[in-house]
Amino acid sequence: MDKETKYKHMTKKGHGNGKCGCGFIWLLGFIGALSYYLHVHSGTFWLIVLAFLKAIIWPAVLIYHLFLFLKI
């Protein structure tokens, strides 16, 4: 079975289409974190840039501390 036929077969059943819907959950978390950090770091342009960068990386920091807590 070639790749295209396998892909059509998998998506026909609703499996393997690569869409999990997690992007929307991440977007909601990003918006929430951005609004929080903008409230905390309001002021100059560079503080707003810092708030944006913190909102982008907060999931990585959260998972890092979760792994530390679980001792993985």
Image (cartoon, rainbow, N blue to C red):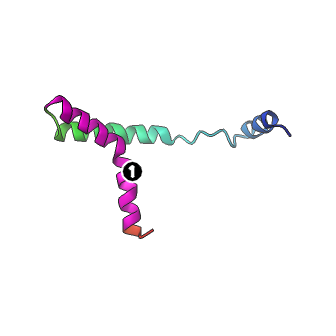
Report the number of discs. Answer: 1
Q: Residue furthest bottom?
A: 71
Q: Residue at x 48, y 39 (%)?
A: 23
Name the spot of residue 30 as percent of width and height, x first. 36, 39
Q: Residue at x 35, y 60 (%)?
A: 65
Q: Secondary structure at mark 1?
A: helix
**Magenta part of the chain:** 44-68
Q: Quadrant of residue 33?
A: top left
Name the spot of residue 46 as percent of width and height, x first. 20, 33
Looking at the image, residue 21 sits to the left or right of residue 59; the answer is right
Q: Residue at x 78, y 33 (%)?
A: 4
Taking depth in this image into account, of 70 and 47 the one nearest to the observer is 47
- Using the image, determine if residue 10 lies above or below residue 68: above
Q: Residue at x 69, y 43 (%)?
A: 15
Name the spot of residue 25 as percent of width and height, x first. 44, 42
Name the spot of residue 2 as percent of width and height, x first. 83, 37
- On-image quarter of the C terminus: bottom left
Q: Which residue matches tag 1?
A: 60
Looking at the image, residue 9 sits to the left or right of residue 72; the answer is right
Q: Residue furthest top?
A: 45
